[in-house]
Image (cartoon, rainbow, N blue to C red):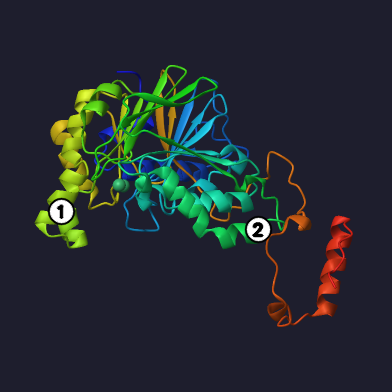
Amino acid sequence: MKKMSPTLSGIVLGAVGMLVVVSLLAANYADTSANDSTSQVVEDREVYYPGTEELAPDEMRVIACGTGMPNARPKQAAACWLVELGNGDKFLFDIGTGSAERISALKIPYNLIDKVFLGHLHSDHFGDLDALWIGGVVANRVVPLRVWGPSSLEPKYGTKAALEHLEKSLAWDIDTRVGNTDTRGLFLEVTEFDYRKVNQVIYQENGVTIRTIPAIHIFDGPVSFLLEWNGLKFAYSSDTFPNKWWMEYALDSDIAIHESFISPESLIEKQNFTPEAALNVGTQIHTSPAQFGKVMAATKPRLAVAYHFFNDFDTVQPILRDIRMTYDGPLALATDYMVFNITKDDIRVRMAAIDEDIWPQPSTIPLLPPDASMRRTALSQEMRDGRVVHRDVLETVYAYINEKFGSNVKLPE
Ligand SMILES: [Zn+2]
Ligand SMILES: [Zn+2]
């Protein structure tokens, strides 16, 4: 067992990981406020402030951008994990509904978030792809969005078909933006790979290799991912029942993120499932906490991360009880904005402090002014005739902007 930071030890030993982290935060604030010197700088941060920490060349940072369930809730978005590497590369694994908001809070220029790997096509794993794709363009991404996802038994269930239809459904959105903003990032580059292949390489660039193994989840198509770089191994299940491929290929991961669904009793008590439905969904379609423990006991990651449950004071007790029946190794019970810094010697787990008033970061590539000749859409004469033009007010606005920013934009006739 490699050395763990005090924060991780706290989470492993604590009955409720979140409470431990929160109490550490509270202690930190209390220390700062008790000291009346304004010059004190706290060096050893127990909190991750996005945009303030360079990764070491050999370091991996993983951030939970969605750890919840298909049910929407403010505290937890659906599945999404960001992996950042010391070589500058960044990868998203799944982008479930609500996760784009979490991604925005990390203060990363959108040009750098251009690679998304989909484990399967449930909306709680790709429901915010449109928000990242189109929203990313509006938020200054000027490079295409690259998406990798699995095939299925029939083409209509594959990633390519899903994203072709997504693009069609967004025709009005896409065409109204062309010519009105810099839309170089509107292109979607989709790579569909064979879900059945075992340990297949789907990405290999810049010293990073990403492989897939089949996952078992309701119907053919789902996969799990293995990312290897610089001697570090990240394994992500997306959704899966325990399976032989994970047992073989996720072995000895540095960080293994695997689904551990809400316990069957919580499905009955919180979601009004019948016992039969709760046992089917909670132990057959998904991996239950006790099964998660078995998987981790057999594969022995340096840190096991359980996700895909609502992480509350009352749900976490049966989950931890069931995991601990079968696994006593290093464990984190994920919630949104949990941050993992991983090197060969250490794994540090913290929570991120989020600025809710976030704005998009500037583009890393200069933006181009809108090219009106590119416009695909225009108001019909009938709609144009309906406009009420306050020309005097608009002249004032144009004059003010031109003076303040040194521009010379003419008010349209
Ligand atoms: Zn699923
Ligand atoms: Zn899921």
Residue drawn 54% across the image and 49% down it:
133
Spot occupied by residue 304 in the image (x, y as percentages of width and height): 29, 31
Q: Mark 1 and mark 2: span between their CA atoms?
A: 45 Å
Q: Is residue 101 visible?
A: no
Crowd band around label 2 with a 10 angstrom C-alpha radius: few (<14), some (14–19), many (20+): many
Judging from the image, what secondary structure is the residue with disc 2 in?
Answer: helix
Judging from the image, what secondary structure is the residue with disc 1 in?
Answer: helix
Q: Quadrant of the N terminus?
A: top left
Pointer 1 and pointer 2: residues touching (CB < 8 Å)?
Answer: no
Q: Nearer the viewer, residue 276 or 40?
A: 276
Count of picture labels: 2
Instruction: Decide if residue 305 is on the left or right side of residue 103.
Output: left
Spot occupied by residue 134 in the image (x, y as percentages of width and height): 57, 53
Q: Nearer the viewer, residue 397 or 341?
A: 397
Residue beneath disc 2: 177
Residue drawn 60% across the image and 43% down it:
110
Quarter of the rendering containing residue 387: bottom right
> 13 above or below 66?
above
| Outermost residue toward the left in this view | 276
Q: Amino acid at mark 2?
A: Arg
- Checking the image for residue 278, the label placed there is 1
Q: Nearer the viewer, residue 34 or 147?
A: 147
Q: Amino acid at mark 1?
A: Ala
> 201 above or below 28?
above
Quarter of the rendering containing residue 88: top right
